[in-house]
Structures are given as C-alpha cells and as structure tokens.
Image (cartoon, grey):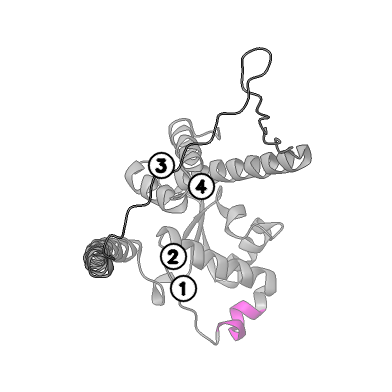
Amino acid sequence: MAWVKLDDAMPHHPKVMAAGPQAFALDVAGIAYSNRYGTDGFIADAVLPAVLPCLSQPRKWAALLVTVGRWHRDDQRGGWTIHDVHDYQPTGEEQKELSKKRAAAGKAGGTKSGQSRRNNAATKHEADVKQVASTEPNPGPVRPLEASPLPPPADADGGTNVTKMTPRARGTNPRAVQQQQHRRDRQVDQARSFGHSIASIYPDDRQDATDIIAGEYRDDGQLRREALEAYDHYATTGAKA
C-alpha cells in the first residue's frame, strides 16, 4: 500500500483555487493513482475515467488542470503528467523497492509467527498430557454388562418398522440469486477494465502488470484471471476484450 503526501496548504494554492473543486478532486485522485501503480505522475487517456469514477467529464477537468499548470498534456504517450509530482511523492522505482522490503518483512514475520504458534501448540499439548496423567482416577469395580435392547419388530415385508426422518431441503430465493449474479458480473467487468488500464501503462512489462493485478485481486482467483486475460488481449491487440 502506498501513501500520498499532500501539503496542508494545497486547497488554497492559487492554481487549485483557479481550477475549482472538481478539478482539485481529480488532481488528488490522480496523485493517489500515480502512487498506487508507480506511474511517476503519468495518467493515460484510457485510464482517466477510472481515476475518479464518480466524476463526470473527466477530460474537461483534466484540460482545466493543464490550463492552470497543475497537469501537462503528453500527446506522445497519450495522456497527462502531474506537475512536479516527485516534489512530495516517491518515484515508481522507490515504490517497487519499498514493496519488496515490505513483502520480505511480511514473509519473515509470517514464518516467525508460524513457528511461534507451533511451539505454543506443542507446549500446550505436553501440558495437557501431563494434566490428564496426574488427574486420571484409579479404576473402580467393573459393572456387569447390561443386556442389549431387542431389535425393533419386523414388518410384513421382513424389514424393520422404523420411521426415518428426512431433513427438509431449504428453498432458494430466485431474486437473491439473481442479485448475487448481477453483482458478480459487475465485479468481472471491473476486473477486465482494470486489466485494460494496466495494459495501457505497462504494455511491454507483463511481470509488473501481473504483480499489480495479483495484489489487487489476491483473494479472488477468478477476477485475477479475468484481469490478466484482459491485460493480455489489450497489450497484444490494442483493443478491449
């Protein structure tokens, strides 16, 4: 996870005040997007609508940020660049190094924590065994075995006359199932759009793209596959799947 550093005087900066609240929101969202994906302030045309999904007409506000000098148009790469983004924000390479260090630290911590849990479990098991051995009562007189109950009477066909209880099957709510499917379809569409966005930024670097997509959908293998397939299709053909 990356963090964004903002000057507390930023809302009152002349450029920001001239751009207005919508452009300011897009500016901050653009900085957050750049930090999250290590783009060094670059925002591609294809990605702009996803930077702040609740904002309508994002190209209009991006053009206004260019007018006031907060963003710059990059026609060569097809997008925008945030002005002086590295005055406060780390570079993409610095973000990658930080992510590697955090991953290594997390792995080491997980290994140590797992070993500690195993040691604690072994210690508890030994203590439980000792407690059972110390509190086990002496055997008393053996009681005579009781006679087994007679089997149930047979019916006319020779089978036992026993009534079996069949559990009642639970019904399903068709509307709830349909709503759940709609939600899943939206999640799949969002994952594909995410894959397209990453392909526009890293068209020739599948390893970095794979790492980013895996981090975004680490708990959902299907969405991860959908995003990767969309990335491959867009990176190869230049068209959305």
Instruction: Identify the secondary structure beneath mark 4.
Output: helix
Report the residue marked by disc 2: 35
Q: Would you say the residues marked 2 and 1 are in contact, meaning their CB atoms lie under 8 Å apart?
A: yes
Q: Residue at x 41, y 48 (%)?
A: 214
Q: Is residue 225 magenta?
A: no
Q: Measure the C-alpha gap from mark 2 to mark 1.
A: 7 Å
Q: Which mark is residue 203?
A: 3
Give whichever of discs 3 and 4 has the lower sequence position: 4
Q: Earlier in the sequence, mark 2 or mark 1?
A: 1
Q: Amino acid at mark 3?
A: Pro
Tell me the distance, in whole angstroms, between the alpha carbons under discs 3 and 1.
25 Å
How much space separates mark 3 and mark 2, taking CA atoms? 19 Å
If you read the primary sequence from the N terminus, does the residue marked by circle 4 or circle 2 appear first?
Answer: 2
Task: Give the labeled residue for mark 1.
Answer: 4
Question: How many angstroms separate mark 3 from mark 4 (CA)?
Answer: 10 Å
Give the residue at mark 4: 197
Residue 95, placed above or below residue 44: below
Residue lying at 56% horizontally and 66% vertically, measured from the top left? 29
Q: Point out the stretch of residues depicted in magenta.
A: 10-17
